[in-house]
Image (cartoon, helix red, strand yellow):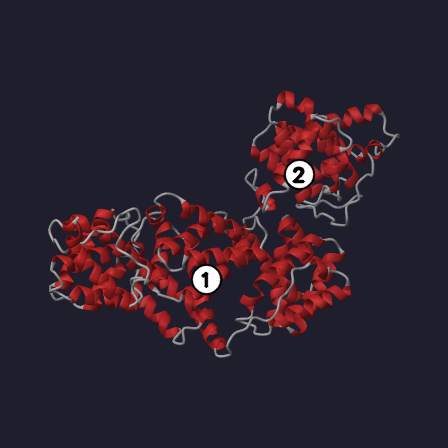
Amino acid sequence: MESSPKSSVPRAHAPIKCPSTCEDVDQLRTPSVSSQEFIDFKRKATTIVEEYFSTDDVAATANELRELRVPCYHYYFVKKLVSVAMDRHDREKEMAAVLLSSLYNDVIDRPQVYKGFCKLTESCDDLSVDTPDAVDILAVFVARAIIDDILPPAFLAKQLSCLPDGCKGAQVIHRADKSYLSAPHHGEIILQRWGGSKNITVEEAKAKIVDILEEYLAAGDTAEAFRCIRDLKIPFFHHDVVKRAVVLAIERGGAAEGHILDFLKSASREGVINESQMIKGFNRMIDSVDDLTLDVPNARCLLKSIILKASSEGWLCASSLKPLGPEPKKAAEDDAAVKKLKAKAVSIIQEYFLTGDIIESVSRLEAENRSCSPSVNAIFVKKLIIAAMDRKNREKEMASVLLCSLCMPPEHVVAGFHLLIDAAEDAALDNPAIVEDLAMFFARSVVDEVIAPSDLEAMEEEASRRKAVGSPGMLALRNAHALLGAKLSAERILRCWGGGGTGKAGWELSEVKEKVSKLLQEYDCGGGVREACRCIKELGMPFFHHEVVKKALVSIIEKRGKDERLWGLLDECYSRGLITPNQMTKGFERVADCVDDLALDVPDAREQLRCYVERAKKGGWLDASFSITRPGQQAPVPDGIAASS
């Protein structure tokens, strides 16, 4: 088909029909073209390829190929372009992939592209002589062609049946299928394999998609919108067009909703957005509809209505979508608070990252959420961690310290983590390291005793019902378990981002012990209980609060109970939740472990400890089953019995 030159040749996206057999591919050649014409075409095609790699001019290359007027041999151009690029740098490989995508179906017909790749796989043994890693490179080209919608996925199975077992061409097919196209986020990975120098970043793509949709709603020019979407050359990312279009339809309603539905319907029928991308876009919308309800309370009902309309018109397969689920239960009084927090949470978090003022940030959040709404706290947790993951280690450490200082109910934090798990797949497009970051945040929250280990297990069990095994959220949860199971995990996890929440290097344990000793001495000499609690909290090491318990208890025993101030401090810390039952128990256990050494200076140390254990049990600090006799240690024999024996 002849067409006028373009700087970026648009692709048609009608369904690709591939030849049914290998013989059909060979029959694509037109008999009327003489062998001399083929020889001339090969020579000119080689020149065009070399000139393209020198000039990077897609439009000029398209014109020169048209002017040869032998479309029946375009498959050779495909083969030549790829085989030359295979022996060059990543820049030329990326240029070749972009050129094929641009010429597809406007200059080079679909069957010719298909035949060109068939010839490439058939000649892979020869290509390997000059290019040792030809199998891997050609596998990427095949995968890229499928991602760019210029080869049908069925190419893999049909071409494999035409190749001899064990040949390098068959290895290409296997590698393209198993190593590249089956990987999570394979579209983005394959697109960026050679640097993506001809493509835009994810952030730029999202901004351009928003501009295209806004311009469409303003002007109503469907053809222009489709042209702009094609020119982005990111067919694997068309699900974002769908999601953002549906968001606009829900937010604006009325006439805008009708225009958006017409737009998506036409995009589906004209092949601009394929079925898999349409389904993926709606599934992403289903995953994030609860967040949208904060701005549009009836968003769930509107989305359900849109899905029904699209399904009835035949351009969306509703049975392939995730279940929308029931309306989540929440108190009516939460609505206003949630909306208010969403507007102010970002400013609270940004100011905290600038000033590092924990007390001010906690006060502002408490002022905005006086009723301690679970949904408000969950959203704040989500926004805090998402903001930190986009920044440096300093902010990640600060986020963990703030999360610990907020003293939220564990179930509120867990609800925020569930929101993060639900949003992880989308966030992975912007943050490739999201699995590692989330895993560290989850593990750190357990170490900081913000949540319990059982909460993490419950999160994984709940997420497994809704998420795929290889999804970013599930991988993060499993990595968190692995981190926590490692030797000396608490210290390692604490130091992962530098420690201290100020961007400085983490403290050595000896320094922490010295700080604990000083703050206890200052308090025992007349300091205020509030100041002592503040100092303990600002250590930023809640997993090490057992040291406070141990040192305070040892000091009390050494003074033979003559000073009750330190016991009062422990009581205050426990009642405030600053020292958890787990840390309290661990502190008493450490004293029990060293009580024999302590008895060298304080002979009745064991009896004193036994009395304080009973006192702590009555106060609810320790479990009734707690014993100062350690496993494998014999209970001490009373002196009278020892003497009689």
Give the labeled residue for mark 2. 177
- Which quarter of the picture shows residue 441? bottom left
Label number found at residue 445: none
Marks 2/1: CA–CA distance: 38 Å
Task: Identify which amino acid the numbered label 1 is placed on.
Answer: Val
| Image-based side of 203 in relation to 270, left or right | left
Instruction: Please identify the quarter of the rendering in which residue 113 is found.
Output: top right
Q: Mark 1 = which residue?
A: 414
For the residue carrying disc 1, how many other residues have a C-alpha within 10 Å: few (<14), some (14-19), or many (20+)? many
Q: Is residue 368 visible?
A: yes
Secondary element under disc 1, as helix, strand or loop, is: helix
Q: Residues within 10 Å of mark 2 (few under 14, many from 20)?
A: some
Q: Residue at point 88% right, 30% down?
A: 31
479 sits to left or right of 27: left
Residue 522 point in image, percent of width and height: 14, 61
Query: What amino acid is labelled 2 in the image?
Result: Asp
Q: At 18% across and 54% down in the image, what residue appears?
A: 638
Pick the residue in front: 142 or 612: 612
Between 243 and 88, which is closer to the camera in this rendering? 243
Rendering coords of residue 343 (x, y %): 45, 70
Relative vertical location of residue 614 with respect to residue 237 in this rendering, above or below = below
> Which x, y percent locates residue 468?
59, 52
Question: Could you tell me which quadrant the N terminus lies in?
Answer: top right
Q: Is 572 situated above or below 156?
A: below
Residue 643: x %, y % from top left: 14, 50
